[in-house]
Amino acid sequence: MEKVSLGNISCYTFSSRKQFLDFIKDKKQILIAVNAEKIVKKDNKLAGIINNNIGYADGIGAVKALKRKGYEDVIRIPGSEFWLDIVKEFHKEKTFYLVGSTDEVINKTVEKLKNQYPNIRILNYRNGFLKSGEKEELIADLVSKKPDVVFVAQGTPRQEYLMDELIEHHKALYMGLGGSFDVYVGKVKRAPKFFQNLGLEWFYRLLRQPTRIKRQKVLVNFYFKMVTGKI
C-alpha cells in the first residue's frame, strides 16, 4: 500500500477494506474520496487538503489510473459503504459525531444507526446547513464533546473545506460522505449492483438525472489525460 500521485492529488492504493480499516484505526486525519472529477478539478485548496490527508479510490476512474501505474491490487472503496464499515468495526470503542443533510435525514440516520448498533455512542448530530454563527457553535461542541470520528455529509468541496477547518480545532478521524446519509435511509437509491460491478454508477446517475451531463463531461478530460500519461 502506497501513496501515489494522480496529477495534482495523491491517493492511497488500498487493496482491501480491512487494510484501510487497520490503517486508519489510530489516525486523526481526513478521509477523502478520490474520483475522476477531483483528479482533474483545478482547485488548489482542495488538492492541498487531499494531499495532507488520506485520499482513497472511491471512483472507478481513480482505480483505473492507479492500475495503469502498476498498482494492480488496488480496489475501489465506495465511501457510501465504507463509513458503515467504520461504524461496524469501531462502534464499541470509538465515539461518533454526525453532520449533514436535512434534519429529517440526519434524524433517521441516527435512529437507524442506534437500531443497528445499540452500543454505539453518538455524542451529537446536526444538519449540514450551517447558518451564520453555527459553524462556531459546531466547533465549540466538537471541542467540548471530543468525538473520535466525525462524519460530514455536505458534498464536495464544501465538506472538505469545512473538515479542514474543524480538524484545526479538534483532532479526530473525519470523513466526507456527500449524499451517503440520504442513501442510508433510502431517500436516494444507489445504482443496481449490475452498474456498480461494471464501474458504471456514474452512467446510471446520468440516466436518472440527464442534467448531470455537464458534470460528466469531466470524464472525457480525465480519460484523455490518463491515456496520454498526464495523470
Image (cartoon, rainbow, N blue to C red):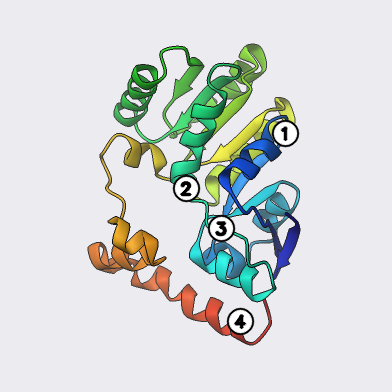
Please name the residue that numbered disc 2 is placed on: 155
Asked if labels 4 and 1 touch by Cβ distance under 8 angstroms, the answer is: no
Residue 40, label in figure = none
Cα distance between the residues tagged 3 and 1: 21 Å
Please name the residue that numbered disc 4 is placed on: 225
Q: Is residue 24 left or right of residue 202?
A: right
Q: Quadrant of residue 161?
A: top right
Callout 1 crowding tier (Cα within 10 Å): few <14, some 14–19, many ≥20: some
Cα distance between the residues tagged 4 and 2: 25 Å
Pointer 4 or 2: first along the chain: 2
Dot in front, 4 or 2: 4
Q: SS class of the residue under badge 1?
A: loop
Cα distance between the residues tagged 1 and 2: 23 Å
Cα distance between the residues tagged 2 and 3: 23 Å
- Expressed as whole percent of the image width and height from the top left, the position of residue 122 reads 49, 17
- What kind of residue is marked 1? Lys
- Front one among 151 and 200: 200
Pointer 2 or 3: first along the chain: 3
* Residue at 33% in and 23% down: 112
Cα distance between the residues tagged 4 and 3: 21 Å
- What kind of residue is marked 3? Ile
Pointer 1 or 4: first along the chain: 1
Q: SS class of the residue under badge 2?
A: loop
143 shown above or below 133: above
Please name the residue that numbered disc 3 is placed on: 75
Q: SS class of the residue under badge 3?
A: loop
Pointer 4 or 3: first along the chain: 3
- What kind of residue is marked 4? Lys
